[in-house]
């Protein structure tokens, strides 16, 4: 009870002091030399108690840039607009109109910092994103954008579907480097760029070897020199692989047929226990065979190192990773290793056969060859070659691919009936 009375007395004294100093219009309490209720105190209280006033964004500030790409009457054009938060147009830029081609002549790149980048008629153009005015143009690009990336200093790195393979443009629009083609134009169709550690990595998905999988060009930005990755492994083309190949170092040699459409067939030629049909591909310097799982559960892709002789008549296969286990193949992947001899004809050999059968060089004919078959009576492999003019068979023979000798079914050209 004493504690309650004491607090009540203190409260009454405080209230009296407040009324005497703050409530009375004629008197002001003084604290630290400042009158409580003075203008100074009021300003301090106002600063402390009032919440900050939210600043409204200007209605005419650009919040988004729209790129409308169109075609009309065989012409390509684009309309680029900067719009505010209400969706209203703040500025508009209309490109010229250009005859349509295979690749786009107008391409959007996008916003970087205060600028908006795009390509118009093979030139890189930069607009001020806030008012749509042209900042600069670089007419040295000359491509249709397939990939781009910005560096930390806002340098633009880009490439084009058919070239250039690489270009660097500074923030102020100057060309720092332009490379039309790389690797003697044996790689093409760049489609991806990455920036890391002062280097640009460009991925190409087209090459002169018809190899599947990407080949990379790595550009050093300190001096714009470059090196290739994945190209040095390729020593043969898809065309070199197409044909029929007979294993030469086995008692039950494997026949491997690689067709131009990517399909394949393989089987042991003596036992002929099973004939397997599947697909193959070339990835870099590897020949990848989709071998049929012996438990009939699908296929397993097995990569082989492939070496093709200079005359394209010999092929050597070895497992890319001998330590890899292929449990569902039960050793079939190892049976396919070894050296093979081509027992089908190249185009040059077919031209020789046509001449040997007396067909004139200037006669328009079609020459086809069958897949090899084994002739038991002769104890050799044969390939049937048919030469036709239209639907008429004008020459042909069954030829031993080992000796190039016409053995059976020989029809020499004797003129058109």
Image: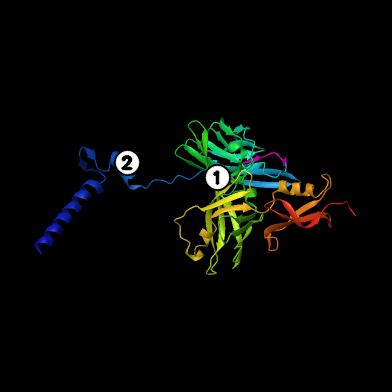
What is the x, y in percent for residue 50? 36, 47
Q: Which SS class for mark 1?
A: strand
Q: Which SS class for mark 2?
A: helix
Residue ID at (54%, 54%): 338
Q: Which residue is mark 2?
A: 43
> Is residue 112 at all visible to an observer of this figure?
no
Check if residue 193 falls in the magenta segment. Answer: no
- Distance, label 2 to label 1, CA atoms, is 71 Å
Q: Is residue 88 above or below residue 1?
A: above
Give 334 or 150, whichever is nearer the viewer: 334
What is the x, y in percent for residue 349? 72, 48
Q: Is residue 273 above or below residue 190?
A: below
What is the x, y in percent for residue 239? 65, 49
N-term mark: 2 or 1: 2
Q: In the rendered structure, find residue 215 and report the number of the disc placed on it.
A: 1
What is the x, y in percent for residue 289? 56, 57
328 sits to left or right of 378: left
Count neighbours of disc 1 (C-alpha within 10 A) and say few if under 14, some if 14 to 19, many if 20 or more. Answer: many
Check if residue 96 falls in the magenta segment. Answer: yes
Report which quarter residue 204 is drawn in: top right
Report which quarter residue 410 is drawn in: bottom right
Give 30 or 27, whichever is nearer the viewer: 30
367 sits to left or right of 86: right
Q: Which residues are magenta?
A: 91-98
Q: Where, quadrant-wise, is the C terminus in this rendering?
A: bottom right
Q: Examine the residues drawn in magenta and state their main secondary structure.
A: strand
């Amino acid at each position: 009870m004493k504690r309650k009375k004491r607090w009540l007395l203190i409260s009454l004294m405080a209230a009296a002091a407040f009324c005497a100093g703050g409530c009375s219009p004629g008197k002001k309490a003084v604290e630290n030399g400042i009158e409580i209720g003075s203008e100074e105190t009021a300003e301090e209280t106002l600063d402390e108690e009032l919440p900050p006033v939210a600043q409204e964004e200007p209605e005419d500030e650009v919040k988004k840039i729209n790129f409308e790409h169109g075609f009309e009457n065989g012409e390509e054009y684009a309309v680029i607009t900067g719009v505010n938060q209400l969706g209203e147009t703040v500025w508009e830029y209309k490109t010229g109109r250009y005859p349509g081609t295979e690749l786009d002549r107008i391409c959007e790149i996008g916003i970087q910092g205060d600028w908006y980048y795009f390509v118009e008629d093979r030139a890189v153009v930069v607009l001020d994103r806030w008012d749509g005015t042209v900042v600069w143009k670089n007419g040295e690009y000359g491509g249709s954008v397939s990939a781009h990336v910005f560096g930390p200093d806002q340098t633009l790195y880009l490439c084009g579907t058919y070239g250039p393979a690489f270009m660097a443009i500074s923030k102020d629009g100057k060309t720092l480097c332009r490379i039309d083609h790389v690797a003697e134009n044996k790689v093409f169709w760049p489609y991806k760029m990455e920036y890391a550690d002062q280097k640009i990595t460009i991925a190409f998905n087209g090459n002169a070897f018809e190899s599947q999988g990407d080949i990379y060009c790595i550009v050093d930005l300190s001096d714009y020199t470059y090196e290739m990755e994945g190209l040095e492994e390729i020593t043969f083309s898809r065309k070199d692989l197409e044909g029929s190949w007979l294993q030469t170092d086995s008692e039950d040699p494997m026949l491997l047929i690689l067709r131009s459409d990517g399909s394949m067939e393989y089987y042991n030629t003596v036992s002929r226990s099973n004939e397997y049909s599947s697909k193959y591909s070339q990835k870099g310097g590897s020949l990848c065979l989709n071998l049929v799982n012996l438990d009939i559960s699908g296929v397993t892709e097995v990569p082989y190192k492939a070496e093709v002789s200079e005359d394209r008549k010999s092929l050597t296969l070895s497992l890319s990773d001998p330590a890899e286990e292929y449990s569902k193949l039960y050793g079939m992947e190892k049976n396919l290793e070894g050296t093979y001899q081509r027992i089908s004809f190249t185009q040059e050999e077919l031209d020789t056969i046509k001449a040997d059968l007396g067909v004139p060089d200037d006669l328009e004919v079609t020459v086809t060859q069958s897949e090899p078959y084994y002739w038991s009576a002769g104890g050799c492999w044969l390939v049937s070659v048919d030469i036709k003019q239209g639907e008429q068979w004008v020459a042909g023979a069954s030829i031993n691919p080992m000796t190039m000798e016409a053995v059976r079914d020989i029809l020499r050209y004797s003129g058109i009936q």
